[in-house]
Image (tube, helix red, strand yellow):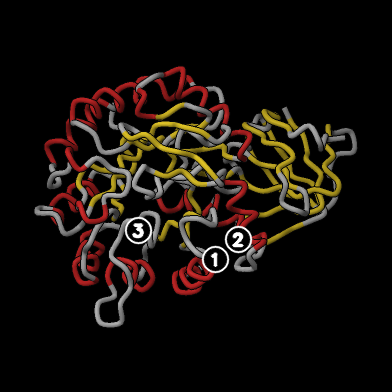
Amino acid sequence: MELFVYADQFFLENEIAGPGFLQIINGKFASYYKELPNESAEVIDYAGHWIAPGLVDTHIHGFQNHDVMDNDFEGLKAISEGLLSCGVTSFLPTTLTSSPETLNEVVAMIGENYMKVQGAKIKGIFLEGPFFTEKHKGAQNTKYFGDPSIELLEAWQKHSNRFIKKIALAPERKGAPEFIEHAVKDQITVALAHSDATYDVAKQAVEKGASIFVHTFNGMSGLHHREPGMAGAAMNLPHVFAEVICDGHHVHPAAANILMNARSRKETVLITDCMMAGGMPEGEYQLGEFPVEVKNGSARLASGSLAGSILKLKDAVKNVVKWGIATPEEAVYMASTAPAKSIGMDEECGRIANGLDADFIVLTPELELAATYLDGVCRYTSGKEEAR
């Protein structure tokens, strides 16, 4: 089946094109044309709109009152379907620090069922923990912290049908270098997080193969002119990606801009770190084993510490443009192509490219989400904007 999508602009990987026509054949992206090559072809008309790759959220714990740690397939399905309203077409369900047994069960549930979800596609599992440092624990339960264990990782891989795509750890923990080498050899992306590491320790971890800094500035040793710490490493080391939560609560816009300028917008990854209260009204919720209050746009523990976010990835895109720290093209890239590249999945998602699944979003020039498509089929519409 062949169809064409007409729009004013298309966010292709290395250029903005348009107006023109994007060809879709059997649910896959094909070619881009300035003029319609076949006058009798079916055309979806999005005049006045922009077409961008579907967004890729590589760090998300929950949505619409469901948490990955609930270990409930119906909840996982609801998260997947709800994410379409955020412009997300691919994601990594993200766990929290917990007991090895609980993590066994959660990753097994995801590994058995990920192909059955009907919404945003599950591209792997992100294990956020449990190999962290207490000083920067954030909303992670210190009771389960420990040194990196290859044996535990192998168990989780086995239970998940080898579906672990990314794991975060504190690089100062004992055995981290050997663990990183093992994980990378197993094609698991290693991220650094919840850590008080020095710059040199972070650098050694990157030299062993770690390649992502998790929610940069949050849960890590800060930048000091005599000890650049984890934050300095995130900004200065070559060939790594830096995640950032651009909800206006986790990171000041100026700090996000400094990171993007230092790291480059090709290597900065917009994430949400969204918890179950995303898409829900203010009130009381849970993040793993901790009660959380959602108020004034943020989610916080009783201590006042931030506990994930309620950010939608489409809003992170809008925010960085509104703050004047990224162009629309850069913002879309940081929420689609960059996250896909950070986990080695850019041959599957995050780009408009010949042969990839036709997962894309329709935006207004004000960066409002009008529609979300999976495999060339409209799966979400805002109701305000309709194709003609």
In the rendered picture of this protein, how many numbered marks are placed on residues?
3
* Dot 2 alpha-carbon crowd within 10 angstroms: few under 14, some 14 to 19, many 20 or more: many
- For residue 48, above or below residue 230: above
- Residue 58 visible? The answer is no
Secondary structure of the residue carrying numbered label 2: helix
The one of 344 and 97 positioned closer to us in this rendering: 97
Residue 40: where, in percent of width, then height? 89, 33
Instruction: Name the residue rendered at 32%, 56% in the picture.
Output: 219
Kindly identify the residue that appears in the image at 30 percent across and 77 percent down. Answer: 224
Per the model, the C-alpha gap separating discs 1 and 2 is 8 Å
| Foreground: disc 3 or disc 1 | 1
Which residue has dot 3 on it? Answer: 213
Q: Position of residue 383 (x, y in %)?
A: 78, 32
Q: Residue at x 30, y 40 (%)?
A: 127
| Vertical arrangement, residue 139 with respect to residue 210, above or below | above
Circle 3 packing at 10 Å, graded few (<14), some (14-19), many (20+), is many
- Determine the secondary structure under disc 1: helix
Q: Is residue 187 above or below residue 238?
A: above
- Which kind of residue does numbered mark 1 sit on? Pro
- Residue closest to the eye, 280 or 348: 280
Q: Which residue is mark 1?
A: 253
Query: Between 149 and 186, which is closer to the camera in this rendering?
Result: 149
Of pointers 1 and 2, the one earlier in the residue sequence: 1
Q: Nearer the viewer, mark 3 or mark 2?
A: 2
**341 or 196: which is nearer to us?**
196
Q: Residues within 10 Å of mark 1 (few under 14, many from 20)?
A: some
Viewer can see residue 190: yes
- The CA span between labels 3 and 2 is 19 Å
